[in-house]
Image (spheres, grey):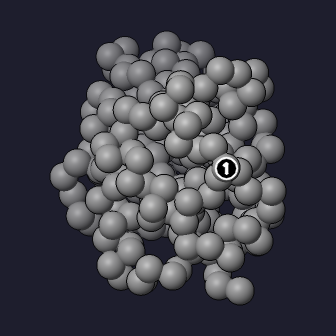
């Protein structure tokens, strides 16, 4: 049975305890390392509140000493627009057609999949592992085109992902925390309590570098 490559992408702006809870739950459920992959220039949202160097540094601090969560800089090093389709096509060229690859995404992001570039082609290249949220949109009425695209793709175990290179969808039943990165940035800018929502080393980095002090806070689900 082949090893699964699991990629968890996002702006991580900043990385917070909720991100780490999802990554740890995915590691435990799928028994594989989680490659945490910060985006350089996400096309679907406003520019990040912190630059790529700061976001990468905070992520490295957050996962230091955890051998199962790995910093993956491939999108930062490529630069330009961070389209998932470009990333996974490059991975396929590198790893071949048979390697099982999965993207870890939140349920809200997955429901918005039809807005991604070349989204239908992603099912030919990767699996999806979908982290669930309370009031889960996966249990409601999905957009018709997404519902049709995932019909028959549900996987009931991690082994199914390892047995196929792409095309399956697995629900990760790990409730997401209520606070998002947007909320965190707003809390920091407004002087509300925020340190308890972050790994201490990340909170210290934000404090030391004066990040997110502007009230011009961009919305983001990550």
Residue 85 in the image: state x and y as whole percent.
34, 55
Characterize the local packing of mark 1: few (<14), some (14-19) or many (20 or more) Cα atoms within 10 angstroms.
few
Which element is circle 1 on? loop
Residue 40 in the image: state x and y as whole percent.
30, 50
Q: Nearer the viewer, residue 85 or 196?
A: 85
Query: From the viewer's perspective, is residue 54 above or below residue 210?
Result: below
The quadrant holding residue 203 is top right
Q: Nearer the viewer, residue 181 or 103?
A: 103
**Camera sees residue 162:** yes
Residue 123 in the image: state x and y as whole percent.
48, 56
Outermost residue, left side: 80
The quadrant holding residue 63 is bottom right
Q: Residue placed at 68% from the left, 43% from the top?
A: 131
User: Which quadrant of the rendered structure holds the N terminus?
Assistant: bottom right
The reply, left or right, for residue 183 in relation to residue 198 is left
Q: Residue placed at 33% from the left, 33% from the top?
A: 44
**Camera sees residue 64:** no
Q: Nearer the viewer, residue 131 or 204?
A: 131
The quadrant holding residue 211 is top left
* Number of marks: 1
Query: From the viewer's perspective, is residue 212 above or below residue 83?
Result: above
Outermost residue, bottom side: 1
The reply, left or right, for residue 120 in relation to residue 70 is left
Q: Residue placed at 44% from the left, 79% from the top?
A: 97
Query: From the viewer's perspective, is residue 157 above or below residue 134?
Result: below
The reply, left or right, for residue 33 in relation to residue 118 is right
Query: From the viewer's perspective, is residue 36 above or below residue 173?
Result: below
Residue 68 in the image: state x and y as whole percent.
67, 71
Q: Residue placed at 40% from the left, 29% from the top?
A: 212
Q: Which residue is mark 1?
A: 152
């Amino acid at each position: 049975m082949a090893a699964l490559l699991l990629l968890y992408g996002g702006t991580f702006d900043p990385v917070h305890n909720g991100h780490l809870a999802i990554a740890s739950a995915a590691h435990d459920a799928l028994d594989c390392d989680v490659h945490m992959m910060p985006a350089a220039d996400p096309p679907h949202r406003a520019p990040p509140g912190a630059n790529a160097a700061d976001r990468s540094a905070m992520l490295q601090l957050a996962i230091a000493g955890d051998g199962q969560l790995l910093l993956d800089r491939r999108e930062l090093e490529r630069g330009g627009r961070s389209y998932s389709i470009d990333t996974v096509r490059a991975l396929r060229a590198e790893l071949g057609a048979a390697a099982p690859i999965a993207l870890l995404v939140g349920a809200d992001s997955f429901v918005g999949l039809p807005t991604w570039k070349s989204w239908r082609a992603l099912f030919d290249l990767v699996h999806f592992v979908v982290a669930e949220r309370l009031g889960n949109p996966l249990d409601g009425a999905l957009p018709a085109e997404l519902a049709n695209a995932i019909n028959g793709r549900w996987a009931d175990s991690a082994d199914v992902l390892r047995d196929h290179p792409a095309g399956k969808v697995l629900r990760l039943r790990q409730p997401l925390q209520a606070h998002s990165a947007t909320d965190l940035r707003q809390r920091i800018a407004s002087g509300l309590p925020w340190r308890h929502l972050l790994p201490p080393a990340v909170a210290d980095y934000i404090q030391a570098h004066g990040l997110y002090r502007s009230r011009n806070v961009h919305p983001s689900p990550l």
